[in-house]
Amino acid sequence: MKSWHRYTITLVGGLAVGLGAAWALTGGGLRDGGIENGPWSTSLGYGTKATDAITRAAVAHGGLLALPAKETIYWSAKTDAAGAKLDGNCRYSLSGTPLDARWWSVTIYDEAGYLVANPANIWSVNGANVALDAKGEWRVTIAPSKPAAGAWLPGTKGQPFHLTLRMYNPGKAFRADPEKALLPQIVKEGC
Amino acid sequence: MRSWLGPLAFGLIVAAATAYAAIWAIPYGLMNVAIERLGQGEINTMSYGNLATPERQPVVRPSPDLAYSSCPYNISDGPIAIDVAPVPGRYTSLSIFDAATDVIFVRNDVEASGKPFRIIVARAGQAVPKGAEVVRTNHDHGIALIRILLKNPAEIGAIDAVRRQSSCGTVTKLK
């Protein structure tokens, strides 16, 4: 094999590896943002000129047109409280107290970040449509079939899923210490 | 085997340079795709999108709780004006993104005291109307996006007429 053959092979290989690495490095969606709180992750740098190139590309790849943290904080979860991957075949309890924000919502997406068809046409719950119990807590069941009682966020059988928690106009205290804020619990109840 | 050391080192350098360039280029490429999808070929015009559903997801991770109105813009020939009419009692925001996907302006209904407002988007050096509130950018292209939060999807019918009072277009008068 001639020398230029070897250089051509490694040139093509290098281009392919470089493109693949860039896509993989930025494929974490709105996750891997550096701030962790249980299964939730975010960054306060989304959408700003100050953010680093990898985060900017990751947001473009997984959450294009995201707002900066003062306006909206986007939390993403791929696992439950025990660290297991979120599975559309299973039943989860999603619960919490009202969040320190003007408005909040939790939306269910597939792994690529898109809505998936379900018979109820429900893809999110928000602070305006969840009921608070006597303790001031709300609870939603994520499952492929409708629960006997309570609010339902449909999962899709055979598909893993991600959750995105949006907090519009989060409070100053929340933005000052998001790692310690009380966020919704994601607990697997069965499969 | 030694004859591969040089080519392999070359391949590693190519891979690193390609990854660096691709990470820089991804936001611009995806913004161009979003401009095309949201505007459906229209530029400097406000589109009042239907609510996101599995069948309609022009960008990744859309919120089904939001009514999105979008104005993909191109200011290479002159500034644009964006007029925003907040929906009373509802979170409404205007965010303006440049070609690199960075937010260059954001204002919500509370910051606007619930009142309509006009923003001019212009490149440095472009003439703008006197007294106007101007956002300067280094890029020709981008997207202006208006978000209105809904308590449930059925509200879109009642809110649609109000959100259509928001608009964008090329600035034609400088006075």
Image (spheres, rainbow, N blue to C red):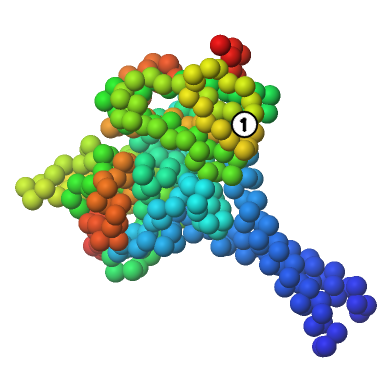
Q: Is residue A17 left or right of residue B136?
A: right
Give the residue number, with chain letter if any, for mark 1.
B123
Q: Quadrant of the C terminus of chain B?
A: top right
* Residue under the image location 34 percent in, 20 percent down: B115
* Residue under the image location 66 percent in, 62 percent down: B19
For this orientation, the residue located farthest to the bottom is B1
SS for dot 1: strand
* Residue under the image location 29 percent in, 54 percent down: A176
* Chain under disc 1: B
For this orientation, the residue located farthest to the right is A2
Q: Is residue A83 left or right of residue B4?
A: left
Crowdedness near tag 1: few (<14), some (14–19) or many (≥20) residues, C-alpha within 10 Å: some
Q: Quadrant of the N terminus of chain B?
A: bottom right
Residue A161 in view (yes/no): no
Q: Camera-side residue: A161 or A38?
A: A38
Residue B63 drawn at (x, y percent) = 40, 40
